[in-house]
Image (tube, grey):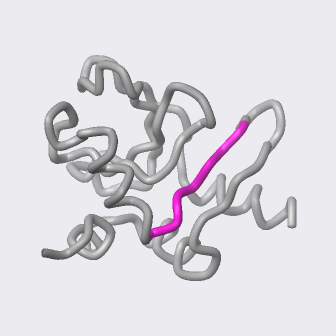
């Protein structure tokens, strides 16, 4: 069986794929506007998905790929054709709890590039 990254590769935003292929994860504080960001290495996405039993609670259109270092994971909504990033609480994991956090993953990638 393919891991989640490989399985959904064709549906993931190009800005995310380019970043993860080059850096394969990142963690740090991006300042007041963007906050603390943890981007999981592609090899750990499936492990985290399994460990948090996301298959039981998270609807299939959400692709978790990181966290805010606290109680929320970062997700893409695979139903959309965008790179918008949502916060989804680890406890609850429902569509009702999803909150748009970043208008574009590209903004995160650019902020990380400036911080390096």
> Which residue is found at the position 40% from the left and 65% from the top?
13
Image position, residue 109 (x, y; %):
66, 61
Q: Quadrant of residue 44?
A: bottom left
Quadrant of res 42: bottom left
Drawn side of residue 79 relative to residue 43, left or right: left
38 left or right, relative to 47: right
Image quadrant containing the C terminus = bottom right
Viewer-nearest residue: 16 or 24: 24
Residues in magenta, as a range: 36-42
- Vertical arrangement, residue 59 with respect to residue 26, above or below: above
Assess whether residue 41 is covered by the magenta stretch: yes
Determine the residue positioned at 62% across, 49% down: 38
30 lies above or below 111: above
Q: Is residue 10 left or right of residue 89?
A: left
Image location (x, y in percent) of residue 67: 54, 41
Q: Is residue 5 left or right of residue 53?
A: right
């Amino acid at each position: 069986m393919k891991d989640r990254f490989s399985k959904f590769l064709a549906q993931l935003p190009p800005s995310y794929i380019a970043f993860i292929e080059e850096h394969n994860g990142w963690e740090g504080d991006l300042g007041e506007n963007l906050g603390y960001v943890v981007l999981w290495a592609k090899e750990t996405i499936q492990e985290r998905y399994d460990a948090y039993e996301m298959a039981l609670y998270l609807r299939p259109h959400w692709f978790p790929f990181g966290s805010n270092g606290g109680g929320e994971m970062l997700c893409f909504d695979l139903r959309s054709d965008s790179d918008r990033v949502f916060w989804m609480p680890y406890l609850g994991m429902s569509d009702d709890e999803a909150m748009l956090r970043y208008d574009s993953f590209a903004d995160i990638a650019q902020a990380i590039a400036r911080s390096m």
